[in-house]
Image: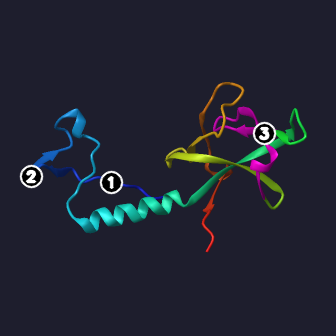
Amino acid sequence: MMTIRWPATYTTGGHCRSRSEGSQLKNRPAAHSLDQLWQLLLELIEVIRMETAVLCEVRRGLRDSERTVAITNFHGRKEFLRIEASYLRQEGEQTYLPVGFIYEHPASGSILIELPLEADSGARRMFVPEKNVLMRDCVTA
């Protein structure tokens, strides 16, 4: 997984400042050169092109076109949500729910995902084991 590191200093209005100066300046990207910005943009596009999906258990829904899915979080607890059957992805014998990728935590081997809908418990985001996440290029040539 790609890690983006901003340089410790950057220029604003001709003045060089450190990230610690002023709260409104902390999260601004460094603009040292056009080549650096272009490289950063290409790396971000590569991440955006990836489709992220999480392994889920599927059960019948309230309607024929609906399914109830269970997603196991990092601690082994399950979150349930109802989703249209056409939204789910099949990879071999396993079913995956497309989700949003938020953050990877390498130390624990988990990934923070954002669910497409609120779970029955009210959760919108959850940490899941990295082994349960499928990431693949969603752009076909």
Q: Is 1 in the magenta?
A: no
Give the answer, above or below, for where 96 lies relative to 20. below
Q: Which of 63 and 42 is in front in this view?
A: 63
In this rendering, does residue 42 appear at all? yes
Q: Distance between the residues labelled 1 and 2?
A: 22 Å
Dominant SS of magenta comes to strand
What is the number of the mark on residue 108? Answer: none
Report the residue marked by disc 2: 14
Q: At which x and y percent is residue 120?
A: 72, 26
SS at badge 2: loop
| Image quadrant in which the C terminus is located | bottom right
Disc 3 to disc 2: CB gap under 8 Å? no
Name the residue tied to disc 1. 5
* Residue picked out by circle 3: 69
- Report the side of 12 relative to 122 (left or right): left
Q: Mark 3 or mark 1, which has the lower sequence index? A: 1
**Which percent across, then down, holds residue 20?**
19, 38
Task: Name the amino acid type tagged 1.
Answer: Arg
**Crowdedness near tag 3: few (<14), some (14–19) or many (≥20) residues, C-alpha within 10 Å:** many
What residue is shown at x 81% (from left), y 46% (from top)? Answer: 85
Give the Cα distance between marks 3 and 1.
36 Å
* Residue kind at label 3, given as amino acid type: Val
Q: In this view, does 68 lie above or below 109?
A: above
Give neighbour class at mark 1: few <14, some 14-19, many 20+ (Cα, 10 Å).
few
Picture residue at 86% right of the left edge, 42% below the top: 65
> Residue 138 location, x and y as percent?
62, 63
Earlier-in-chain disc, 3 versus 2: 2
Q: Quadrant of residue 77?
A: top right
Left or right of 67? Residue 11 is left
